[in-house]
Image: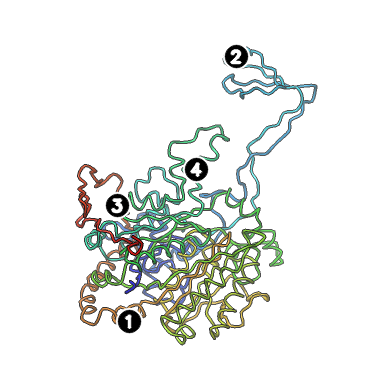
Amino acid sequence: MTALPVIVGMGGINASGRTSFHQGFRRIILDHLADKEKQETYLGLACLMNLVRYEDGQLLDQDNQVIPEDTIESRFGQQILDGTLIRKIEKEHFDPDATPWHQKMTLSPSDQNFSFLVKRKDLPNPLPESWHVSEASEECQCNVTVQGALEVLHPSTLDNPIKAAGQLPTGFDPAKLYNSHHQPRGLQNVIFGATDAIKSTGLDWQDILNKVNPDQIGTYSSSTQGQLHAEGLGDAMQARLKGKRVGSKNVAMSLNTAPSDFINAYVTGSVGSTISTTGACASFLYNLKTAVHDIQSGKIRAAIVGNSDALITPESAEGFGNMGALANEKYLKMIDKTESVDYRRTSRPFGNNCGFTLGEGAQYFVLMDDALAVELGADILGSVADVFVNADGVKKSVTSPGPGNYISMAKAVALATKVVGKETVQQHSFVLAHGSSTPQNRVTESHIFHTVAETFNIENWPVAAPKAYLGHSLGPASGDQLAWALGVFAHNVMPGINTIEAVAEDVFDQHLNIATEHYPCDPQKVAFINSKGFGGNNATGVVLSPDLTLEMMTKRHGEAAMSSYREKHAQVKSNQASYRDQANTAQFDLLYRYGQDMIDEKEIKITQNSLTLPGYKNAISLELENPFEDMC
């Protein structure tokens, strides 16, 4: 039997808030929530954004005054809305109106040459041929006479045309939640996201470890561009140009494998499989594919899957902007025929648009095989049937779209029809689009959906696009889509794209339902997660609803096993409720096991049949099968 990879936990952070218990998704569909859910969402965001805090069982504002929970929306509602989703870039990242840079200048002497004083230790080496150095009257200084012109770089600022991004909620700072040791922002988000995902399961991580062998736990995570902030790659690349030295941690902190490394070393203590795959914008789905296949094959029984990228830096904005990939003020004004820009509406998937909007975030999911989920009583958020990845073949521009996504999307729908039947796919499935908000994407991706829908006789196929609200976080972007898919399953609300007034005329939407407003929908059973990444990194995942997943598990394991499962599940739900209350009041208690419970390598015991690690209940089997038995 092929194991079914089920999703039992999710966590993370992006522009809409915390991922666990659908807080981020609820922020998107606030007006469609029941009063209790709406109040809970406002409470969670207010605490996350440090507008209020819980202390000794009381809710306090910033003036230490006790306030009732049911007044949060009236007191802080607009501030919460304004401080989430896509908005003007906050100075915490950089000032888009006065972005620091160096102005290149050529200084010419008013006479034949000119001179200046400088400390001898600050003289460049080698000395320019046009410089003549002599001693000055002051100690340690010298006089430099320059013959001809002198080129200098002088600190200055520029008005950056890229002014909006999908930023983490205003006031949220993961560095203050644990001893972050000056780690890059992207890795701080990893610690938060992985902790949130694990605690959301309602299971003790040690209980999971006790049920499996140590090498049957997997970590699948990466950053698409590494860690770009000063603590990582930023200063590693810039320090010497700024006249500083590269720090001892810059290179180690910059690697795109660091998210997996941090989870293993500081969160889970895993000694199992560790994979860091990158595929541009499809990186999350690449990691999910590997985890799903390892679970299906039985190599892995539980996995942490996710990605983290923190891209809101001047360098990212300038780099993507100069490619013509980002929405900027000039073209937004042209589209809207106005002299003012609505920063909330810079990302417009499938509408009249001019480029994508940068985002940031971390998304993590806990998966395990169906047998382990039954044994533990795990909560079922859904399952992943498979992920398909296909390249584009030969083309002129490596960054342009190509045919690979037709293959991955068609395979995904074909598999879903085999697993759940044609009628279910036709009547109860939807698409979470890549929806990057570029003119090319709106045409090419919609044509793929149109062609596949026409082929499989799907009409009015719902298409949603998270980047309209969250921006494009690159590596975690497909994780944002998966979190939305689970949100749709849980709430029966399909998010529209309210950053557009209408679908663009060149979009192929004859068989699609690309709504501009959120709307209630019938219970959905299948979600297709689609990604079209730079360089031809195309991926499509098939996600099954929790109800459908439980039906499949019951058919496989039988009613007696599921009855026992439901008894254990009641305790898991109680544990989840406790963590949900803690998370809603920002009492996260992040898992950060720096230097704790380290393995004493002298205590490792190895026989020809097994390897035993101190601190682990089960041994690692060395009784491996010969995969080439027919050849030996």
Instruction: Determine whether 87 is above or below 412 in the image.
Output: above
Is 469 in front, or is 439? 439
Packing grade of label 3 (10 A; few <14, some 14-19, many >=20) is: some
57 is higher (above) or lower (below) than 545: above
Q: Name the residue under label 4.
A: 230
Q: Distance between the residues labelled 3 and 1?
A: 34 Å
Element marked by disc 3: loop
- Using the image, tell me which numbered label, if any, was put on residue 138: 2
Residue 551 is tagged as 1
Disc 2 vs disc 1: Cβ atoms closer than 8 Å?
Answer: no
Tell me which amino acid carries mark 3: Gly
Q: Tag 2's secondary structure?
A: loop
The residue singled out by tag 3 in the image is: 269
Residue in the foreground of this view, choosing between 279 and 173:
279
Q: Where is residue 437 in the image (x, y as percent from the top left)?
A: 60, 66
The reply to whether discs 2 and 3 touch (Cβ–Cβ < 8 Å) is: no
Can you give x and y, in whole percent of width and height, for residue 612 in the image? 21, 52
Seen in the image, is 90 located left or right of residue 340?
left
Q: Which amino acid does label 4 sit on?
A: Ala
The secondary element bearing badge 4 is classed as: helix
> Can residue 43 be seen by looking at this rendering?
no
Distance between mark 3 and mark 4 Cα atoms: 27 Å
Task: Inspect the image, locate mark 2, and give the three-letter code of the amino acid beneath it.
Answer: Glu
Please name which of the two marks, 2 or 3, marks the residue nearer to the observer. 3
Say if mark 3 contacts mark 1, CB within 8 Å: no
Q: Quadrant of residue 304?
A: bottom left
Callout 1 amino acid = Glu
User: Closer to the observer: label 2 or label 4?
Assistant: 4
Q: Which comes before the other along the chain, label 2 or label 1?
A: 2
Q: How crowded is mark 2: few (under 14 residues within 10 Å), some or many (20 or more)?
A: few
CA gap, disc 2 and disc 4:
37 Å
Label 4: few (<14), some (14–19) or many (≥20) C-alpha neighbours in 10 Å? many
